[in-house]
Image (cartoon, coloured by chain):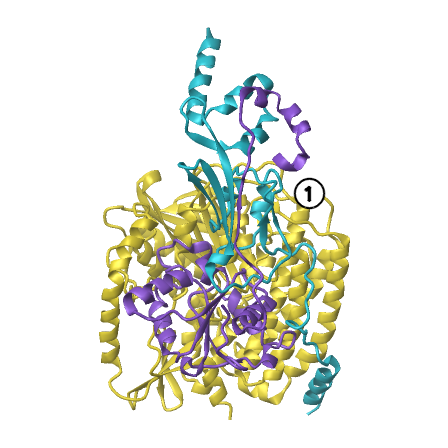
Amino acid sequence: MHTSITKILDSLSKYGKIEKVHENTYFIEVSADKVREISEILHWKLGGHFSVTVGSDERPINGYFKVYHVFLMDKQKLSIIVHVKINPVIPKLPSITPIIPGANWHEREAHDFFGIFFEDHPNLERLILPYDWPEGVYPLRKDVSIRELRNKLLKSRNEGEEKRKAEEEYIVPIGPYHPALHEPEYFELYVEGEKIVDAKYRGFHVHRGIEKVAEERLTINQIPFIAERICGICGYTHNVAYCQAVESAAGIEVPLRAKYIRSILLEIERIHSHLLWFGVLFHLLGFDTGFMMTWLIREKIMDLAEVLTGNRKNYGLNLVGGVRRDINSEKIEFSLKTLDYVETKLRRVLDKMLKLKEVISRTKNIGLLNRNEARKLSVVGPVARASGIDTDVRKHHPYAAYGEVEFKVPVYDEGDVYSRALVRYDEVFESVNMLRQLLKNIPKGNIMADEIKIPEYKKGLGLTEAPRGENVHLVITGRDNKIYRWRPRAPSYNNIPSTLVMLKGENLADAPAIIASIDPCFSCTDHLVIIDIKRNIKRRIRLKELARRRQC
Amino acid sequence: MSARLHILKEALRTGVVTKKYPYEPIEVPEGFRGKPSIDVEKCIGCGACVNVCPPNALSAEIDLNKSVKRIILFLGKCIFCGRCQDVCPTEAIKLTREFELSTLTTNDLYQVVELKMAKCEVCGKPYATIRQVLFTAKNVPKDQRPLLLLCSECRSKVSAKYISYARW
Amino acid sequence: MSVKLFMKSLWVFHLNSGSCNGCDIEVLNVFTPYHDVERLGIKLVASPRHADVIVFTGPITRETLPKAIRAFTAIPEPKAVVAVGSCACGGGIWYDSYAVIGGIEAFYKILREEYKVKIPPTVYVPGCPPKPEAIIYGIAVLRGILRQKQRITYFVEKEAPELTKDLIINIEKYMESKSRKEICNEE
């Protein structure tokens, strides 16, 4: 028995004013002292989960900083966004990390970019900005432009270099280490012999300043192209999530045929991403035949995407209000033939590969994440579904054409690397089924909405299910065909902190498989640093080297 | 054991699939988004493509001394999205099917189109290319066509006189 | 100018300096059965000390700049550079962001001025992401097997009609008298 929507809204109305922005999306404004209470109720008592925290500088509009906490209630198909006004002179707010540990990185990011201080946060340090960033410079505030930032940073680069060299020499007194490369480390593993005792993650070397570029230089219809290039594997989901956020803020109705075309390409992307992941997992386990066979089957899917959109990746298909390219009956024939080939090949090969003794012994009961830990850290996607949490944006917050197809959501309980592989295996075949339904039932009609008018200063939320989990984009529209604030949140952001829990107590040889099992962005986890605390030796080693050396 | 035999059988059944590129050419499908190319006879130098290009790979330069306008396309920054093809009024810029674009210097990745500009009758400043003025003239009613020979500032001054006159 | 330094095979070190991974996956695709670049003798190595050629992807971000400089200087001479993708060739769609140096050209400027390092022969492979076949073509151009096709084109308009009131009022007559190609295309 789940609480109904009206009961939830009634119980929340005593905290502040509720505003309905779009179907199933509600904004509640609360005061700073009630934030912790309402977060606890939404995440733990009413069965929803925390999704993302967005900071925003709204001093030109209403004179305050703002923080938005987004919660998704799956069973009731609702999104509830709690927002707080913050004093512009001394910006601070009680942190919700003590109640929901998954909000740790989100609040650190708001601190990095806006200078908002979160009280009682366990470790409010720099997260995303580079090592040598000067103090007191907050890039996403509206009173500093990209050109000023570039001028300030040219000077500080050389000072940071000396600071970094001095610190590294202090940490590594003795022992062999790789002579060629000192660089910001990604995963630091503290080992005693072969067992991992503790782990830390230092990354975000791929920070390119997308949000500032999108706010200053790009127009509303140019942003889909930069959104696609956020990730090289699941870029189209970011594209769709942004367009949905703007369409919900402006109240634009997308024609049904365009929604079907978007769903078809989203599922094609899901299949290629999961096959890529299988290849990477097999490669890290030392099984190169599996790597080559899965990528061979994946090539046919890339050819299909090239026929439908003109490029193997970066489809460039969306604009706000619809799609740019249509699909005709020849292309539908070609797609169905490709799907038949892919399904028969996979059923013959992938099934047997997952039954090999070597694969099972290296993935079963490794990298455990139980349901309680998963809820605390608010993990999403196949990682959550393998730990017993039934959450899928396509079922619980239907978007595009997913309300019109039938499919199952696979959920397993063990929470180890093997069950994550089984979840993705089931999802590939569900995607093939969905694609067949979508291709056969596509309706006739336009592919672009007729009237596209975007009003000023309206808020919208876009949700999609990427191959790695849920994607959330929060958009506030602005003037002169520009966006005022855009926050894209990729699913790996919520998933990477869970590896630090999974790695404790495991063997060093299993570290590559565990890190790869959450399907993080390929390059972020390319390197490991292993710190042997007994012998005080620090070594930097590539993930693939570790996999190759420790196979026997 | 039987799982391994199945995988081996499937590998043998698949056989050799390697394409013989670069020793043989390959075909790309229709609708492939390859290198953008400007047709110099059709381009009117309006700059619509320059406005819409997300990475600013297309840029426009005005040389006041020689009174020419240059449209510069730099393939190094191009993201092959096709927005320039969507908005061009004369279908001058189109995405071809070429993808073999490697070069040994960045200088070879440029395409430049230089067009002559028209000078304003009143102030003498170059304001638009001659081709653009001739293209726009067709869609303007005959009695307002002489206004096209003026730059935008002088044009607004002249039209303001008409408006204030009509009020009386 | 083709680079005839290497006889047969090239050992390649792949460095991701802040890319979205699209180009990285296409570089990995080049080793899979459909394209199989290992038949041309090319091998991926783990350390820059073993490599002949460094493959850059991504606009160089501020965080990876020291890493890129050290990897670049660690490769022994003679060496070559392949810049894959629109981010490496010119900075891509975020060429002016505060967190990005801006592609290989800006990176070379820093190397030349601050580190006094000689610039090696470089091949640029545009594309977003470039097809695996385009990457193979780039390596073939580097080795001198194939000649590059793309050259700079500079068009200068020689003659243009004199704009007079008479011409512009009777534009339809003018267009009928001249051939269609000369002015602009009509529907």
Q: Alpha-carbon neighbours of circle 1 within 10 Å: few (<14), some, or many (≥20)?
A: some
The picture quadrant where one finds residue B7 is: bottom right
Question: Residue at point 72% right, 75% down?
Answer: A345
* Count of numbered tags: 1
What residue do we see at 68% from left, 28% from top?
Answer: C176
In front of the other: A224 or A72: A224
Chain in purple in the render: C
Horizontally, residue B86 falls left or right of residue A507, namely: right
Dividing the image into 4 quarters, which one contains the C terminus of chain C?
top right
The color chain A is rendered in: yellow
Q: Amino acid at mark 1?
A: Asn
Residue C111 position within the rendered picture, expressed as x and y whole percent measured from the top left: 33, 67
Q: Position of residue A316 (x, y in %)?
A: 58, 53
Residue placed most toward the observer, A231 or B20: B20
Question: Mark 1, chain letter?
Answer: A
**Chain coloured cyan:** B
Q: Is residue B64 above or below residue A191?
A: above
Residue in the foreground of this view, choosing between A191 and A215: A215
Left or right: A286 as drawn, with respect to A529: right
Task: Look at mark 1 in the image and give the residue it sits on.
Answer: A446
Instruction: Give me the residue at 67% from left, 83% from top.
Output: A352
Residue A450 in sight here: yes
Q: In the rendered image, is residue A431 in sight?
A: no
